[in-house]
Image (spheres, rainbow, N blue to C red):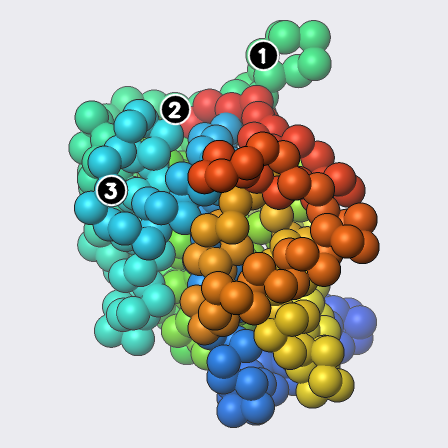
């Protein structure tokens, strides 16, 4: 398919401004600091990895309107045999398994193939009634619901009949392109093409974010280990949909403009790397003690949270230390305690209510 953004036909026509090339170099420089961060603060980074896994699962599902409380997300992630109560928890468990596979085996999942894409989709659907791991059997459209309630077609995806062929072309084009051009160009364009093909009836958005993590890992961009890219995307969700729509316009004709999507993708990576750099700087400056780690976890909580929620995200810190910091935060007026005993919950008065629901988007 010459319409693919990662086809040789399309890639050969690309040109970049000096500012765009400087952005690519800047992200590459961040990559060069990864090993240094890991050597400087291994304990702190281990805590960040624990938090990132929870936030990635929570945010990627919530983008699609799948909302599960932070407490339950932690239980499902930390206890694989936990009883799943409903479809939303089944989605969380499936995403957990797919994330785990990527975190543990990304280097062995190369070269990227259609079979790997199908495997990831199988995992996110493994606890659901409808099995995954197969291309869509019927045509699908990306539908947007307007504030008025009116629905309109935002994008007409590749037909069901053409999808297997389109995905094979996608696989081959990605393998070829990643050998020739900077991954920071090829990876985001491959994700754009995947979303335009929309190969599954359900789970395309979540699969695309898993593929993003996998592709970046294989290109040695390890930021997704320590900062949830899914959370950063969720924080700019409206922009995410706007740039996706802008760059998918005329995709079928191969005359689409990939720049809005590229700029957004690069911005996500820069924001995530700066967040990591800031946390590492806190550690080096003496502010990254166990006390500061606990405070950062508390600040990241949305809505009511329990002692066990904090403990799950600080696995290397003892209970007594966590209790002490929570008491200090309470005396400072930064958190409030609601209830008593096992049902007691802490609340950060500066964050919105827990469990905010987003309007689900069909076929994403």
Q: Secondary structure at mark 2?
A: loop
Instruction: From the image, tell me which residue sits under label 3.
Output: 82
Between 261 and 214, the one nearer to me in the picture: 214
Q: Residue 53 appears at what percent x and percent y?
A: 44, 58
* Residue for point 70% across, 42% down: 336
The answer to which of marks 2 and 3 sits earlier in the sequence is: 3
Question: Which residue: 64% across, 78% down?
Answer: 289
Q: CA distance from mark 2 to mark 1?
A: 14 Å
Picture layout, residue 31 above or below residue 72: below
Q: Residue at image x 75%, y 86%?
A: 285
Q: Confirm whether residue 101 shows in the render.
A: yes
Residues under numbered marks 2 and 3 in contact, where contact means CB atoms less than 8 Å apart: no
Q: Is residue 279 above or below residue 197?
A: below
Q: Is residue 118 above or below residue 29?
A: above
Extreme-front residue of the structure: 341
Residue shown at the point (19%, 33%) measured from the top left: 131
Depicted 113 relative to depicted 92: above or below: below
Decide if residue 138 is on the left or right side of residue 11: left
Direction from residue 212 to residue 26 in the image, left or right: right
Residue beneath label 1, please?
151
Left or right: residue 61 versus residue 359 is left
Q: CA distance from mark 1 to mark 3?
A: 38 Å
Q: Where residue 326 appears, x then y in whole percent?
A: 64, 56
Mark 2 — residue?
140
Badge 3 density bin: few <14, some 14–19, many ≥20, Cα 10 Å: few
Of the numbered discs 1 and 3, the one sitting upstream in the chain is: 3
Question: Residue 325 shows which numbered tag?
Answer: none
For label 2, the crowd category at 10 Å Cα-Cα, with few meaning under 14, some 14 to 19 and many 20 or more, is many
Task: Find the distance from the CA under tag 2 to the CA under tag 3.
Answer: 34 Å
Element assignment for label 3: loop
């Amino acid at each position: 398919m010459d319409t693919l953004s990662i086809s040789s036909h399309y890639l050969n026509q690309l040109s970049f401004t000096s500012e765009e090339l400087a952005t690519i170099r800047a992200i590459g420089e961040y990559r060069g600091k990864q090993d240094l961060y890991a050597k400087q603060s291994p304990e702190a980074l281990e805590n960040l990895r624990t938090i990132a896994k929870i936030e990635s699962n929570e945010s990627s599902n919530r983008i699609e309107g799948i909302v599960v409380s932070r407490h339950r997300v932690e239980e499902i992630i930390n206890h694989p045999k936990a009883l799943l109560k409903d479809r939303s928890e089944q989605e969380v468990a499936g995403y957990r398994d797919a994330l785990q596979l990527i975190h543990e085996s990304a280097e062995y999942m190369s070269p990227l193939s259609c079979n790997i894409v199908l495997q990831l989709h199988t995992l996110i659907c493994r606890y659901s009634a409808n099995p995954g791991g197969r291309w869509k059997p019927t045509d699908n459209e990306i539908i947007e619901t307007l504030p008025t309630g009116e629905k309109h077609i935002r994008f007409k995806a590749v037909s069901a009949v053409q999808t297997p062929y389109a995905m094979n072309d996608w696989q081959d084009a990605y393998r070829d392109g990643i050998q020739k051009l900077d991954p920071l160009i090829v990876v985001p364009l491959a994700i754009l093409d995947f979303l335009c093909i929309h190969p599954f009836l359900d789970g395309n958005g979540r699969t695309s974010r898993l593929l993003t993590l996998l592709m970046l890992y294989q290109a040695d961009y390890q930021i997704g280990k320590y900062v949830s890219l899914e959370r950063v995307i969720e924080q700019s969700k409206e922009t995410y949909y706007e740039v996706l729509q802008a760059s998918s316009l005329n995709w079928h004709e191969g005359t689409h403009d990939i720049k809005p999507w590229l700029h957004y993708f690069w911005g996500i990576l820069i924001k995530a790397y700066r967040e990591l750099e800031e946390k590492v700087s806190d550690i080096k400056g003496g502010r990254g003690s166990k006390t500061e780690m606990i405070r950062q976890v508390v600040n990241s909580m949305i809505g009511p949270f329990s002692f066990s929620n904090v403990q799950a995200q600080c696995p290397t810190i003892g209970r007594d230390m966590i209790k002490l910091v929570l008491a200090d935060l309470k005396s400072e007026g930064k958190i409030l305690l609601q209830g008593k005993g096992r049902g007691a919950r802490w609340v950060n008065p500066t964050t919105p209510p827990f469990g905010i629901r987003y309007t689900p988007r069909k076929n994403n």
